[in-house]
Amino acid sequence: MKVLVVGNGGREHALAWKLLESKQIEHVVCVPGNGGTARMERCQNLHLGVDDFEGISRFALENGISLVIVGPEVPLARGITDYLEEKGLMVFGPKKAGAQIEASKAWAKALMQEAKIPTARAAVFTEASAAKSYVRGTGAPIVVKADGLAAGKGVTVAETVEQAEKAIAAIFQGQFGSAGEFVVIEEFLIGQEVSVLALTDGLTIRPLLPAQDHKRIGEGDIGENTGGMGAYAPAPIATPELMSRIQTEVLERAIATLRAKGIDYRGVLYAGLMIAPNGDLKVLEFNCRFGDPETQVILPLLATPLEELILACVQQRLGELPPIAWKQGAAATVVAASGGYPGEYQKGKVITGIEDAETAGVTVFHAGTKLNQQQQVVTDGGRVLNVTGVGENFEQAIAQAYAGIKTIHFEGIYYRRDIGYRVLSGKQGEQTP
Ligand code: AMP
Ligand code: GLY
């Protein structure tokens, strides 16, 4: 089989890497890929944009691609699956109608209310003055969300009413373009977050191992939000009892309600959940794709061949497969970022030491990297590498990831030294600051 993976992050490198573990996979093409996918054997990059549906479809049809896997949300929300399926290609990822579950927070909230999925109380506004007067009524802390896709930057957890009003004003002034035509204002929840990614063929739902990521830039989970500075799996907070509640109260209700709306949702349904200190669970958001960096810790533990699961989703026969098999142990990934991220940072810094880290046993998934003209790996984004360790337990996995990242150098490298602190120090009940 030849597979085409759309995207250029650490998630897509991990998908390509996992696929290539299987003898069934002859070749993977990443569009556009990164410095890591460029250097893998049986893998190539194709320099097209993720929204160049026509270019992707032409290449896939001319080169015998049997399956397209879509990584990021933006092409899904724009209908890449609808487009490529019409051309006769097999695509993993929901169609445009299903991708609304991530692309519109107001739509997702209405779906959750209809499906009776536990979630934060919320109100939706189409203009600033009503939204502001609402937050003056509720008081702070309160959460302000731009409706549409905003690359993870559309959510403000406001500690004061003034902050909330500023966030509302920014959204309606067009900070996020058309993503800001609606605003969702939501009750502030406390607890610990967990990501549950499930595979579904529109009928059957099979959750993957639960994961937790560290979203903040600073150690101790403080400072600005980022795309994720590290992650680990399986998250111990998601006990088997909690996972079975997530299956029945969240995932099954979501898929049944989508089906009732005529939406045949096939792909990943990712539930971002808040677990309160008393064990209550609430959905913060749904995503229509694999998480990044969660995928980089989930896939190294997967024992069932990934393409078998993905094909079963696309062909709607997931229910015929045996349960998903997992390796024992734990995985952790630490993100090496460019100095200054998530603010301004420089690109083009030469990266050294990746081979040494790999020899020492870690897997390095590239994110913002590319090859320069001399074929050196250079930085090309804010989050640069995901250094991933796997071990019998979290102590080993985390120690391995840090031993690996210490051998890697580039000017301005920044990484958090405390990834996984909750699972190391037994602080699992602790709240997110
Ligand atoms: P979202 O994109 O909706 O998941 O929001 C991004 C991040 O904002 C989440 O991962 C949480 O850290 C935080 N967040 C979102 N909604 C809430 C909420 N209702 N209460 C507390 N934190 C929230
Ligand atoms: N790790 C958060 C996300 O993928 O949305």
Image: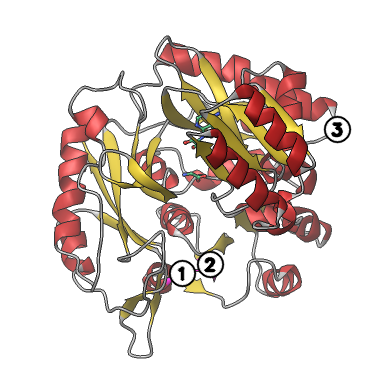
Within 10 Å of disc 2 (Cα), the crowding (few <14, some 14-19, many 20+) is: many
Q: Are marks 3 and 1 in contact (CB under 8 Å)?
A: no
Q: Earlier in the sequence, mark 2 or mark 1?
A: 2
Q: Is residue 120 on the magenta stretch?
A: no
Callout in the foreground (3, 2): 3
Vertical relation: 392 (above or below) 358? above
User: Where's residue 100, x and y in %?
Assistant: 74, 42
Q: Is residue 419 left or right of residue 256?
A: left
Spatial separation of the CA atoms under disc 3 and disc 1: 37 Å
Looking at the rendered structure, the kind of residue marked 1 is Cys
Callout 1 secondary element = strand
Q: Which mark is residue 43?
A: 1
Q: Is residue 52 left or right of residue 87?
A: left
Dividing the picture into quadrants, the one containing residue 339 is: bottom left
Residue indicated by mark 3: 262
Q: Are marks 2 and 1 in contact (CB under 8 Å)?
A: yes
Residue indicated by mark 2: 30
Callout in the foreground (3, 1): 3
Res. 292 in view: yes
Dividing the picture into quadrants, the one containing residue 203 is: top right
User: Where's residue 133, x and y in %?
Assistant: 71, 32
- Tell me which residue sits at (78%, 55%) in the image: 85
Q: Earlier in the sequence, mark 3 or mark 1?
A: 1
User: Where's residue 155, x and y in %?
Assistant: 56, 43
Looking at the rendered structure, the kind of residue marked 2 is Cys
